[in-house]
Amino acid sequence: MRYAFLSLTAVLLILSLTSPSFAIDCTSENYDVSIIDTYSDLDTCDITLHSAEQISGLKLDVHMEHEGSILDRKTFTIDSIAPGSDVTKAFKWNTDDMGDGKYTIKSIISKDGCTVYENAYNFVNGRQTIPRITVDDLVSNSQGFSVMITPQEAVLVDVEYMLMDGSDVIYSGTEKKISVHTQPMEVSKDWNVLLENNMEYSGRIKVKLYSPSVSYIALTEDFTAQDDVFISDTYEDDIGASATIDGISQVPFTGYVRFTVSKQDDDGETVIESVTKKSPVLLNGDDETVETIWEERLTTGVYSLVIEVIGNDGDILDIEESIIESDYEPAAEQGNTTTSDNTEQSPGLMFPIILVITLIAAFMLSQKRDY
């Protein structure tokens, strides 16, 4: 038995020396990628990676620890990072732990099962000091975001904003050195990327304070992207009508404008004409004028006009009603009136003509008798 055991041990030793290792041959030093920024609280987290080279097929594992327990874990696939560029992942934690104390966010970047980079970020939950500002009323929509900052004292802050599609940050920027004095201040910014109609997005802001030490206040708000426009100006008369449409969404508006003119009579309101016109494509900040000409000019009377903007999904985005007062009389009726007037005057004109002819005829007849 002892001989068999020694023989087996020798075989395993030889295999370990001659066979390829079962462990993955990690070559982390060959990848110049790192985590350059992490922020987290109990609700949300964002992590920014930077790569000095073109690299693909990365995996990012993140988990939150508190008092030796893992509270939540997230895993993300990063398809590709271009040389000298950043990729940010932002997400919400799913944890009921709201206790005070120290929390640790551990992040691991790996490729093909090999750890390329590790990072740890700590934060403390629980109000330690009276905040110098409060951040309230974050509103995110298809146009952009607005947030209200209320100071307890004069302060300078940076406002970092992100537009998120799931966990991917598709647009971001920073407004630096915003001076907030004694009055609440609204900070707003429009998105500069196209959004897809009826898709879910999130707007995220981080307000950075520099003193007494660097700290952040973060908020995230979800929204559903939708096309949106409004009527900013109209014109109407007995010949036609027009409407100026302003875009207020980064979802391209590809809808229509409908003009409906009606007239009140004894039987109620009768639609005289309804015309639907295709609108040019509109984005936030764009404006275009859509116009129509009535098939027949509106004759004397008072008409009501309804202008409706129809969205991409067939919903009414805006409506405006007005009145058209016309004093137009068709040319054909004016011609008939003139002819009638001439006919009525003709008997009076014929009598002098007949009298002259009669006198001439009598004169000529008397001259003939003299001869």
Image (cartoon, helix red, strand yellow):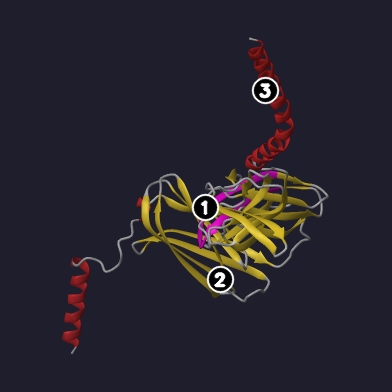
Label 2: which residue? Answer: 65
Give the Cα distance between marks 1 and 3. 77 Å
The residue to which callout 3 is attached is 357
User: Can you say whether 230 is above or below 365 in the image?
Assistant: below
Estimate the x, y position of residue 11 in percent, counting from the top left: 17, 76
Residue 314 appears at what percent x and percent y?
55, 62
Q: Of 131 and 281, which appears nearest the observer? A: 281
Image check: 228 left or right of 11? right
Mark 3 or 2, closer to the camera: 3
Q: Is residue 23 left or right of residue 15?
A: right
Disc 3/disc 2 C-alpha distance (Å): 125 Å
- Answer left or right for 338 relative to 83: right
Under circle 3, the secondary element is helix
View extreme (top): residue: 371
- On whether residue 170 falls in the magenta region, the answer is yes
The overriding secondary structure of the stretch rendered in magenta is strand
Q: Quadrant of the C terminus?
A: top right
SS category of the residue bearing label 1: loop
Pick the front one: 72 or 284: 284
Q: Residue furthest bottom?
A: 1
- In magenta stretch: residue 13: no
Q: Which residue is mark 1?
A: 254
Magenta residue span: 157-177
Whether residue 164 is visible to the viewer of this picture, yes or no, is yes
